[in-house]
Amino acid sequence: MNIMKIATITLLTIRKRQATFLGHVMRRGKLEHLVTTKFEGKRSRGRQREKIMDGLTTWLGPGKVSDILAAVKDRDLWRDMIANAYKQGT
């Protein structure tokens, strides 16, 4: 039971840090192509890695990627979205 609680808290902390990083990158505008573009070429074998945007869309609730990217531009709205998702523990 205690291990599950620690794992949940760790996962929430990771998601919160990913969301904070995404907000930072998108507002700066220098690395946004790393988050929003698709890369050419073959995918590696095995289970595919989870993309940051896929994880954040499931964590922040139902919505489109374009809605999330629009919310990132408004810092106060973005902080509120992250805080609400963190409190809900989803």
Image: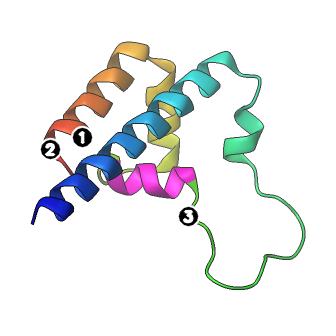
**Chief secondary structure of the magenta portion:** helix
Mark 1, Cα crowd under 10 Å, few <14 / some 14-19 / many 20+, is some
Q: Residue 12, labelled with which disc? A: none
Figure check: 67 above or below 63: above
> Which residue shows up at 55% across the image and 64% down it?
50
Tag 2 secondary structure: helix
Q: Find the distance from the CA under tag 2 to the CA under tag 1.
A: 5 Å
Tag 3 secondary structure: loop
Figure check: 15 above or below 39: above
Compared across the picture, whether 90 is left or right of 25 comes to left
Q: Are marks 1 and 3 in contact (CB under 8 Å)?
A: no
Q: Residue 85, labelled with which disc? A: 1
Q: Amino acid at mark 3?
A: Glu
Residue labelled with disc 3:
50
Picture quarter with the N terminus:
bottom left
Q: Are marks 3 and 2 in contact (CB under 8 Å)?
A: no
Q: Residue 88, labelled with which disc? A: 2
Q: Amino acid at mark 1?
A: Ala
**How far across and how far down the image is residue 5, in percent?**
16, 56
Given residues 49 and 71, the one toward you in this image is 49
Q: Are marks 2 and 1 in contact (CB under 8 Å)?
A: yes
> Which residue shows up at 63% across the image and 75% down it?
48
Q: Find the distance from the CA under tag 1 to the CA under tag 3.
A: 19 Å
What's the magenta region?
Answer: 52-59
